[in-house]
Image (spheres, coloured by chain):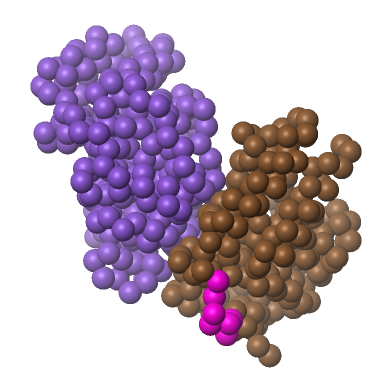
């Protein structure tokens, strides 16, 4: 397993982390996927579950409810994609993204609990707060990307992988893909990195490779914490991906163990 | 009257090139005296102690003014700033202060709303419309960990304009609902230091604005200001608990 690299963002070492070719990239093959699915299948998960780096790093999470801060990543990432496609400003990009969601809600296409449904329930001032939060998120991404010299593009979506026969899906957050000599995946988080940040990054590395049509591991998986001015990176080695898979399996076991008795019995 | 943002727009065209050596020097100085400190310590921007601890009404005024800054940064054209600020804050918050707001009788509530509208007038006059091209960010949090966790500098910048680039181009604006006191300069210096350490780039300017009086103090950030911030930080770290 490779050591975690820690560098300050915005400086020369940050550019180096994204633009200097990592070691030759590896692949996950069908056998890896099969073994992985068998281990999850053995857990006998009673209810469908979704795991991500958060489940690896912070097992106990409160029930989800939309708020301006929780909406900012999804809207901010979509705004970055619009900005790259030619939107004149971050704010207009965010407003366009929100308008699309509102139109979908008005057309009856938004299910209860979705972001679009929640946005449609907000009064204008609260929607402005959402716009501000999303614009702040997107501006941080613009700031990060402006420091890059290598070609990059916004991630089209997070990486998703459903484990066959295990009622478990995995999600890896990703904001920016650097397409230099090898693919480097950048994901951005609020706050500052905790002790389990490396485990979360390795989990994201494994999920990203599982979601890739050819099982290709990213050359590097870089986590960025703009509020702390820090980036942490793991190399895209098979050992790191295996470690990520083990973290995910442990998180799934924990989730099964803490499931309500009625659910386990069901 | 020239607004704060207009003053910043007409900032000197010769903006300093971002220079990572400034940060290396600051970190070197910090590390030299951090070695002698004891327990891990988290510091925030120095408070305005001249006015004493804020009452519940004072804190309500503070959170509402910060909501106004968030709305202004989002380009929201408010008709009823006080009500909009309080309603958006209540939608996101719970706890003691929301209970306090609920406890206000009709007279107290009307007085608070009137007072908040006056703060909104000052904000509008001082900030003006914030163009999207200024890349505004409201409530930008900063958490810089130094000396392997021995010292954490935590900060929230009410309004940040511009993005880190080749030239110094970021302006930091602290908005307070109280009149400016003797701690205002220390606050703007602290914001500048945190931003410099977080991004390895020196910001262009740092300012403190009072929405109560319209007073503004702003400084272009240079090494002298950062040195001043570092000296104040050392005093706070070394002062007896």
Chain letter matching colour brown: B
> For the point 20% across and 33% down, which residue is it?
A25
Quadrant in the picture for residue B51: bottom right
* Residue A28, x across and y down, in percent: 16, 25
* Residue B58, x across and y down, in percent: 79, 60
- Which residues lie in the magenta part? B9-16
- The hue used for chain A is purple
* Residue B145, x across and y down, in percent: 61, 41
> Overall secondary structure of the magenta stretch?
loop
Q: Could one spot residue A15 in this view of the protein?
A: yes
> For the point 62% across and 83% down, which residue is it?
B7
Task: Decide whether residue A210 is among the magenta residues.
Answer: no
Task: Decide whether residue B11 is among the magenta residues.
Answer: yes
Quadrant in the picture for residue B171: bottom right
Instruction: Say if A173 sits above or below B11 in the image.
Output: above
Q: Quadrant of the N terminus of chain A?
A: top left
Q: Is residue A233 left or right of residue B167?
A: left
């Amino acid at each position: 397993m490779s050591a975690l690299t820690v560098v300050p963002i915005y400086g020369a070492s940050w550019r180096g982390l994204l633009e200097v070719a990592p070691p030759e990239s590896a692949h996950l093959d069908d056998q890896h996927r099969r073994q992985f699915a068998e281990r999850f299948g053995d857990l006998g998960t009673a209810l469908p579950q979704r795991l991500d780096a958060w489940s690896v790093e912070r097992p106990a999470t409160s029930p989800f409810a939309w708020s301006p801060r929780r909406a900012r990543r999804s809207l901010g990432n979509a705004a970055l994609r619009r900005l790259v496609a030619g939107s004149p400003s971050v704010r207009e990009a965010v407003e366009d993204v929100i308008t699309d969601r509102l139109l979908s809600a008005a057309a009856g296409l938004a299910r209860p609990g979705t972001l679009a449904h929640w946005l449609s329930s907000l009064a204008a001032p609260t929607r402005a707060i959402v716009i501000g939060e999303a614009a702040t998120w997107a501006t941080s991404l613009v700031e990060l990307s402006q420091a890059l010299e290598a070609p990059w593009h916004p991630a089209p979506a997070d990486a998703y992988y459903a484990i066959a026969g295990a009622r478990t899906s995995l999600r890896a957050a990703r904001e920016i893909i650097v397409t230099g000599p090898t693919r480097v995946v950048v994901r951005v988080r609020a706050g500052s990195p905790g002790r389990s940040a490396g485990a979360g990054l390795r989990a994201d590395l494994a999920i990203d490779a599982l979601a890739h049509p050819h099982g290709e591991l990213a050359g590097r998986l870089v986590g960025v914490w703009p509020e702390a001015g820090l980036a942490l990176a793991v190399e895209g080695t098979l050992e790191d991906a295996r470690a990520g898979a083990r973290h995910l399996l442990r998180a799934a076991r924990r989730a099964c163990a803490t499931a309500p008795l009625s659910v386990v019995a069901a | 009257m020239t607004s704060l943002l207009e003053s910043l727009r007409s900032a000197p065209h010769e903006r300093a090139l971002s220079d990572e050596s400034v940060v290396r020097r600051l970190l070197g100085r910090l590390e030299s005296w951090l070695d002698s400190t004891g327990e891990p310590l988290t510091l925030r921007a120095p408070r305005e102690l001249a006015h004493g601890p804020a009452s519940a009404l004072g804190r309500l005024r503070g959170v509402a003014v910060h909501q106004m800054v968030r709305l202004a940064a989002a380009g929201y054209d408010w008709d009823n700033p006080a009500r909009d600020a309080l309603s958006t804050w209540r939608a996101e918050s719970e706890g003691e202060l929301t209970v306090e707001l609920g406890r206000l009788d009709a007279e107290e509530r009307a007085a608070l709303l009137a007072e908040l509208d006056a703060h909104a007038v000052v904000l509008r006059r001082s900030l003006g419309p914030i163009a999207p091209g200024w890349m505004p960010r409201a409530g930008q949090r900063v958490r810089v960990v130094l000396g392997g966790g021995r010292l954490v500098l935590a900060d929230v910048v009410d309004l940040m304009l511009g993005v880190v680039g080749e030239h110094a181009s970021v302006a930091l604006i602290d908005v307070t609902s109280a009149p400016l006191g003797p701690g205002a300069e220390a606050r703007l210096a602290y914001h500048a230091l945190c931003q410099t350490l977080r991004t390895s780039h020196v910001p262009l300017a740092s300012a403190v604005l009072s929405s109560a009086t319209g007073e503004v103090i702003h400084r272009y950030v240079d090494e002298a200001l950062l040195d001043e911030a570092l000296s104040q930080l050392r005093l706070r770290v070394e002062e007896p608990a």
